[in-house]
Amino acid sequence: MFAMLTFEYRGLGTEHFRSDYRESWDYQRRVHAEVAAGKRPGHVILLEHEPVYTAGRATLPEERPFDGTPVVDVDRGGKITWHGPGQLTGYPILPLPDGVGVVDPIRRFEDAVVDLLTDYGLDGRRVTGRTGVWLPASGGRPERKICAIGIRVARRTTMHGFALNVLPNQEAFGNIVPCGISDAGVTSLAEELPGNWDVATVAHDLEPHLRGHLVAFEHW
């Protein structure tokens, strides 16, 4: 088992661009094959997508876009979500030790995002029975999701990952039942803490938290 973890900032470095979802998915599968074969260490891809809806295996017909907008059906767990400008998407491609199930990496992704939000002064938390990271109901607002998570494990190696909302995208989420949840809201860092937010900066702020929760595979 590799004890190291590499990070890749696609379009979030000196050269800024948004990534096409299908191209990124093809790239993710190539990296996954190399990690699963032991040819490279675990690898985390961080990027910002062009606008796209993706539907996990559990998505119901009534949860898809209300206006017929095209959707990419993917092989991860979970339901439908949106990716696009203003959102940090991360694909941790990680070899899992024997005895570690799909829930374990999800919890570690959640823990890393919760730690990041704590640094920013936000009370991020888990909600029993739901994946992702949430902010509690407050000020007349319901519980609201700030980070969605959906992964797949194949050949004992994870793929897909998390989507952390940095800038508001309420119009895009308003066109679907995000993650199949109709009794809660969706939010972003900028909505919770108004300021000059930048996806690339948030990605770099998140890296040490991901390293801290993911690199020590032998302790899983």
Image (cartoon, rainbow, N blue to C red):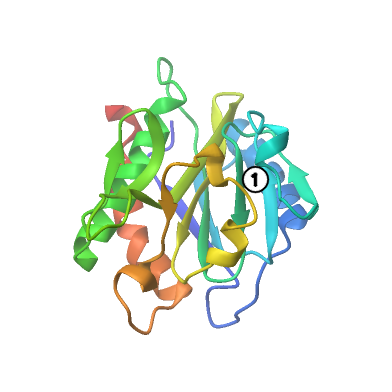
Residue 165 coordinates in the image, percent (x, y): 46, 62
Tell me which residue sits at (35%, 47%) in the image.
133
Q: Which residue is mark 1?
A: 31
Of the 4 image quadrants, the one containing the N terminus is top left
Query: Residue placed farthest to the front in the image?
Result: 140
Residue 220 in sight from this viewpoint: yes
Residue 74 falls in image quadrant:
top right
Tell me which residue sits at (48%, 57%) in the image.
7
Compared with residue 135, is residue 180 higher up or lower down, i.e. above or below? above
Compared with residue 117, is residue 114 higher up or lower down, i.e. above or below? above
Mark 1 residue element: helix
Tell me if mark 1 has few (under 14), some (14-19) or many (20+) residues whose alpha carbon lies within 10 angstroms of its own.
many
The amino acid marked with disc number 1 is Val
Residue 29 coordinates in the image, percent (x, y): 70, 42
Compared with residue 183, is residue 146 higher up or lower down, i.e. above or below? below
Residue 49 coordinates in the image, percent (x, y): 64, 64
Compared with residue 57, is residue 209 higher up or lower down, i.e. above or below? below
Tell me which residue sits at (23%, 67%) in the image.
120
Residue 52 coordinates in the image, percent (x, y): 70, 58
Relative to the observer, which residue lies in front, 130 or 117? 130
